[in-house]
Amino acid sequence: MKLNQYKAFALIFVLSSIGTFTQAADITVKKVTGPLPTSPLAAVWQQAPATDVAVAPQQMTTPKLAKASISKITAKALTDGKSITWRVSWADPAPDFNVDVGRFSDAVAIELPLTKFAAPMMGHRGGGKVQIIYWRGLWQKDIDEGFQDVQNVHPNYLNNLYWFANDNKRPYHVPESFQNPVSQQWFIAHQAGNPMATFSRSEPAQELIAEGWGTLTNQPESATTAKGVWKDGSWAVIFTRPLNTNDPNDYQFSQGEKGQIAFAVWQGGDGNRGARKHWSFWTAYQMP
């Protein structure tokens, strides 16, 4: 996409959100000595400058988010010269990390441009490529407390009759009761390799790439670790990854550079899911 086409995208984005966006200050990445924090509540985060970034409801493509429930996120970043950790926090009166009919998970994502002039709305077709690192409260709970099955969401109402289970220990548990190949063939999405249907997850975050709406693609290998904590009416989530990797689909950080980052947030309790989200424009960051 040529520069003037990118500017047209950016203009549409801004005009659709008039009165919502203000230019955020640059995010200053603070260099620290010693190990980077593994918790978003670690005391070392007090050393990092905080930058408020405005977010608005996604109303450029369907399905749209009709009403905003938050207006900003707060971003911080730390580096030890080898890796970088981003911290994103936002107000949320209650955590949402169970999925059911009419129930959705809280989530947050950071976006980094892989090509120059990529549009902030998930990139654009014709060469506007971005990397997106996505965290879900549901995945965090799976890791913290164990994989959530139907009986975890509805402990007092369950009747499962799975003739293809490999044991007779009712209620059947996923994945323990479905370990043999005959049993697993009935889990179609899992057998197809759908990353959303995995039974075990080592991290609550997923790396993806995109070149516009409808192109979001999972990266099989991920260099990111993540951790989210809800406390006192707000979420705080950190994303940690090396400054540089060997993956051509990973964004590469450089010391002393001025780069760009964007954010997206889903409030599960307000029905946010998929394209129904809050998102931001590009915000500049400065590496030490």
Image (cartoon, rainbow, N blue to C red):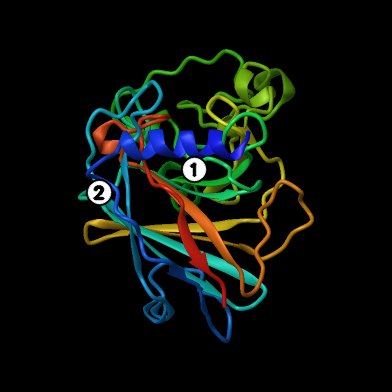
Q: Where residue 243 appears, x then y in whole percent? A: 66, 66
Residue 59: image quadrant is top left
Mark 1, residue position? 120
Identify the mark at residue 71; answer none if there is no mark.
Answer: 2
Q: Where residue 30 appears, x then y in whole percent? A: 49, 78
Is residue 187 at all visible to an observer of this figure?
Answer: no
**Considering only vertical position in the picture, is 119 above or below 151?**
below
Mark 1, other Cα within 10 Å: few <14 / some 14–19 / many ≥20:
many
Residue 252: image quadrant is bottom right
Q: Quadrant of the C terminus?
A: bottom right
Q: Residue at x 62, y 36 (%)?
A: 2
146 or 12, nearer to the observer:
12
Disc 2 residue type (three-letter): Ser
**Residues at marks 2 and 1 touching, judged by CB atoms closer than 8 Å:** no
Q: Where residue 127 appears, x then y in whole percent? A: 67, 35
Disc 1 residue type (three-letter): Pro
**Considering only vertical position in the picture, is 76 above or below 170?**
below
Q: Where residue 97 appears, x then y in whole percent? A: 36, 42
